[in-house]
Image (cartoon, grey):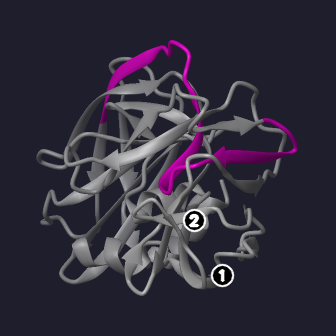
């Protein structure tokens, strides 16, 4: 299972930029990163010459799942309108954005995003094996903010993990069970399962499976798709089920032989 996440995670891309000139970097997703000139520093000294800009984006639900970059803040899900990772270095040593300046990240949106989006900054998360970031809501607008529009603009002086997110209103969470079924009757409970909201960019990893049964109480009475996958005898099995959870119900996800790429494609087609 660990190799599944390693091999399907988003691969960072590295660009070269002149620190003195700054400039714009356009990623494959159409996201644009704008850096002002003379905006980088190291040990309180301005940086000159070429720097390496490493970036990765987590814009789709499948990228969040398979990269382990879930939209969680202190154990609670939130809506993500776009997350990215940014690291800048020179000769292998980290450099940072000067506190007096900000870089801008313009994230295209398929539909008009909800108003009220705020900047979340990523911190390490060791509470879930398949998730690596605990997003913390930024309350200091001098550090950064999200500018609402057809394309979201994140203005920040912080590198590493950033996310344009929105806290969820009180949700009508349900208590129910999810049964995992596979054509092979004996298989490990080393599997992962998620609830993917149909109408919002929200992903929730459901609880651990015991005897192929998951007991869940943190998914609301909203249209979702349950997604589960595991490795059986060295082969990848996955499954998906549409549901609107209700208290006391049991839902069955039937796993079948597939591939991570095929399952990612199905998730992104929702």
Residue in the foreground of this view, choosing between 155 and 216: 155
Question: Percent from the top left, x then y, of residue 177?
Answer: 29, 32
- Image point (69%, 75%), residue name: 20
Per the image, the residue denoted by label 2 is 40
Quadrant occupied by the N terminus:
bottom left
Dot 1 falls on a residue whose secondary structure is: strand
Q: Closer to the camera, 48 or 219?
A: 48
Residue 169 position (above or below residue 187): above
Q: Is residue 103 above or below residue 205?
A: below
Range drawn in magenta: 148-177
Which numbered circle lies on residue 30? none
In percent of width and height, residue 63 lies at: 52, 63
132 relative position to 226: left or right: left
The residue under the point 61% across, 29% down is: 141
Q: Is 208 contained in the magenta span?
A: no
Please identify, in this view, whether the residue under mark 2 or under mark 1 is nearer the observer.
Answer: 2
Location of residue 165 in the rendering, given as x and y in whole percent from the top left corner: 59, 36
Toward the viewer: 135 or 252? Answer: 135
């Amino acid at each position: 299972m660990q190799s599944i996440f390693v091999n399907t995670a988003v691969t960072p891309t590295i660009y070269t930029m002149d620190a003195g000139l700054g400039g714009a970097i356009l990623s494959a997703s159409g996201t644009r990163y704008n850096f002002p000139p003379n905006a980088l520093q190291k040990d309180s000294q301005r940086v000159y010459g070429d720097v390496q800009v490493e970036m990765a984006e987590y814009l789709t639900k499948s990228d969040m799942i398979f990269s382990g970059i879930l939209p969680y803040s202190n154990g609670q899900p939130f809506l993500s309108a776009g997350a990215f990772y940014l690291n800048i270095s020179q000769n292998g040593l980290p450099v940072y954005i000067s506190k007096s300046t900000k870089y801008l990240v313009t994230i295209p949106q398929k539909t008009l995003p909800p108003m009220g989006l705020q900047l979340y900054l990523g911190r390490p998360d060791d509470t879930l094996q398949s998730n690596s970031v605990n997003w913390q809501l930024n309350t200091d607008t001098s550090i950064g903010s999200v500018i609402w529009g057809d394309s979201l603009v994140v203005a920040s002086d912080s590198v590493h993990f950033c996310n344009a997110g929105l806290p969820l209103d009180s949700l009508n969470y349900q208590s129910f069970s999810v049964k995992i079924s596979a054509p092979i009757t004996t298989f490990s409970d080393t599997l992962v399962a998620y609830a993917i909201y149909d109408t919002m960019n929200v992903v929730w990893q459901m609880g651990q499976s015991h005897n192929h049964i998951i007991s869940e109480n943190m998914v609301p009475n909203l249209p979702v798709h349950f997604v589960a996958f595991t490795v059986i005898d060295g082969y990848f099995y996955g499954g998906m089920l549409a549901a609107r959870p209700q208290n006391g119900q049991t839902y069955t996800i039937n796993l079948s032989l597939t591939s991570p790429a095929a399952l990612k494609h199905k998730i992104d087609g929702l």
